[in-house]
Image: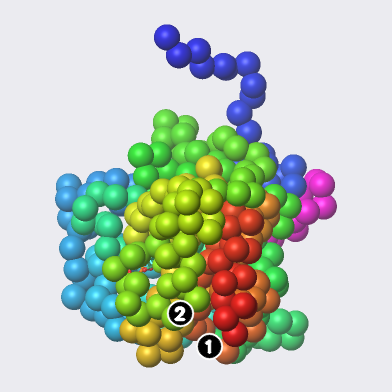
């Protein structure tokens, strides 16, 4: 029989954030903003869980700015996040992977001090096959004196994020959050309707024998990437001296969650297929929030050459190569690229 300890009082997300406020790590308006995002994620979790019974599967019949077909749940999740965050008074504007431009908070509501960015439903290709998907979010400060926020005001490096996180809709729904003081995981208690702290201070092991990559793109990679993966696949008699295992869920949220839990390296590299030759993932909605979460858990994140959090964005929907996870492995992959330049 499994012994479930009940003596430790459970710490809700609300209590955790209040304790962080008392410790001087977060201001009250940011705390309330995070609570609103968490509430929106609970609502998205309900829609995702209904699946075919909720009539939420399949295509929406529309496309986003990157020319990708939107799923019904992409649109539903985007609307839930916009609606939940419109009236709280903590935000100046939202930007989403699913919208061409940022959306300022409507004039009928007070505007707050923050900018919120999100990928409302990451891993959309997995929605219809009942595999984990998620919501990724990032919070920036609205620059001082800006009353009418525009896209340009979001173009801040990842180091400027004041909070970042994701919610994974898997066998259980979990919120993983950082406000710059560690990365913490909360599990949704469906009976109570609240997120409960289940892992304080997640740590990514420094070394790993597991990598995550879509190998079908191999022929589109640049030379140092080809060399790096060739050496991983060579196993213990090759230059890396160990046997690597591979995992690829095709939901970044799920792959990063595995890495935060047991280590590994996640890679979406430079890719000749993409017109900007950057790869697939978006700097502002995916790479930056995930990089902050990983760094706060002791891991590393680069674009193959430089630290991702230092990249100065030039446009809202910019794509970047992504290498993140166990510190020693990210350094090894980055070294292959630097040595080649
Ligand atoms: P999405 O935000 O449109 O869902 O796309 C991002 C997803 C990531 O979650 C995942 O890592 C990647 O795309 C998978 O790409 P591919 O289908 O090329 O393997
Ligand atoms: Mg995505």
For disc 1, the marked residue is 315
Instruction: Please say whether residue 103 is visible from this viewpoint.
Output: no
Image spot of residue 104 (x, y percent): 53, 80
Pinpoint residue 309: horizontal percent, then vertical percent.
65, 72
Single out the mark in the foreground, 1 or 2: 2
Q: Where is residue 81, by image quadrant? A: bottom left
Magenta residues? 21-32
Name the foreground residue: 135 vs 223: 223
Q: Mark 1 vs mark 2: which is more N-terminal?
A: 2
Q: Point out residue 272 in the picture as x, y percentages from the top left corner.
A: 37, 85
The N terminus appears in which quarter of the rendering? Answer: top left
What secondary structure is marked by label 1?
A: loop
Residue position for label 2: 223
Residue 302 coordinates in the image, percent (x, y)? 60, 70
Residue that appears at 45% across and 14% down: 2
Quadrant of the rendering where the C terminus is positioned = bottom right
Q: Residue furthest front?
A: 237
Q: Are marks 1 and 2 in contact (CB under 8 Å)?
A: no
In the rendered image, residue 135 lying in the magenta stretch gets the answer no
Assess disc 1: are there few (<14), some (14-19) or many (≥20) residues with their C-alpha within 10 Å of its C-alpha: some
Determine the residue positioned at 44% across, 81% down. Answer: 222
Quarter of the render that holds ligand 2: bottom left
Residue at horizontal 63 percent and vertical 16 percent from the top: 7
């Amino acid at each position: 029989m499994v012994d479930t300890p009940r003596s430790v009082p459970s710490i809700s997300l609300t209590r955790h954030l209040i304790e962080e406020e008392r410790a001087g790590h977060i201001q009250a308006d940011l705390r309330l903003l995070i609570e609103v995002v968490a509430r929106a994620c609970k609502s998205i979790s309900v829609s995702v869980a209904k699946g075919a019974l909720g009539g939420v599967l399949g295509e929406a019949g529309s496309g986003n700015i990157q020319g990708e077909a939107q799923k019904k749940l992409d649109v539903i999740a985007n609307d839930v996040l916009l609606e939940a965050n419109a009236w709280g008074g903590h935000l100046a504007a939202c930007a989403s992977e699913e919208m061409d431009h940022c959306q300022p908070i409507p004039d009928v509501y007070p505007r707050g001090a923050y900018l919120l960015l999100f990928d409302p439903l990451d891993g959309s290709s997995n929605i219809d096959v009942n595999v984990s998907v998620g919501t990724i979010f990032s919070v920036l400060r609205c620059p001082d004196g800006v009353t009418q926020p525009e896209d340009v005001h979001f173009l801040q490096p990842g180091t400027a994020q004041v909070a970042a996180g994701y919610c994974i809709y898997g066998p259980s729904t979990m919120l993983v959050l950082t406000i710059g003081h560690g990365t913490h995981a909360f599990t949704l208690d469906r009976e109570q309707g609240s997120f409960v702290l289940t892992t304080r201070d997640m740590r990514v092991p420094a070394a790993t024998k597991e990598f995550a990559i879509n190998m079908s793109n191999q022929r589109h990679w640049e030379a140092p990437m080809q060399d790096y993966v060739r050496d991983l696949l060579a196993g213990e008699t090759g230059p890396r001296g160990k046997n690597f295992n591979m995992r690829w869920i095709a939901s970044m949220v799920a792959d990063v969650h595995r890495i935060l839990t047991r280590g590994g390296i996640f890679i979406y590299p430079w890719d000749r297929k993409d017109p900007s030759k950057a790869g697939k993932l978006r700097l502002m909605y995916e790479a930056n929030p995930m990089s902050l979460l990983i760094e706060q858990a002791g891991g590393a994140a680069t674009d193959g050459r430089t630290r991702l959090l230092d990249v100065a964005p030039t446009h809202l929907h910019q794509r970047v190569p992504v290498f993140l996870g166990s510190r020693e492995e990210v350094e090894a992959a980055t070294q292959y690229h630097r040595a080649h330049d």
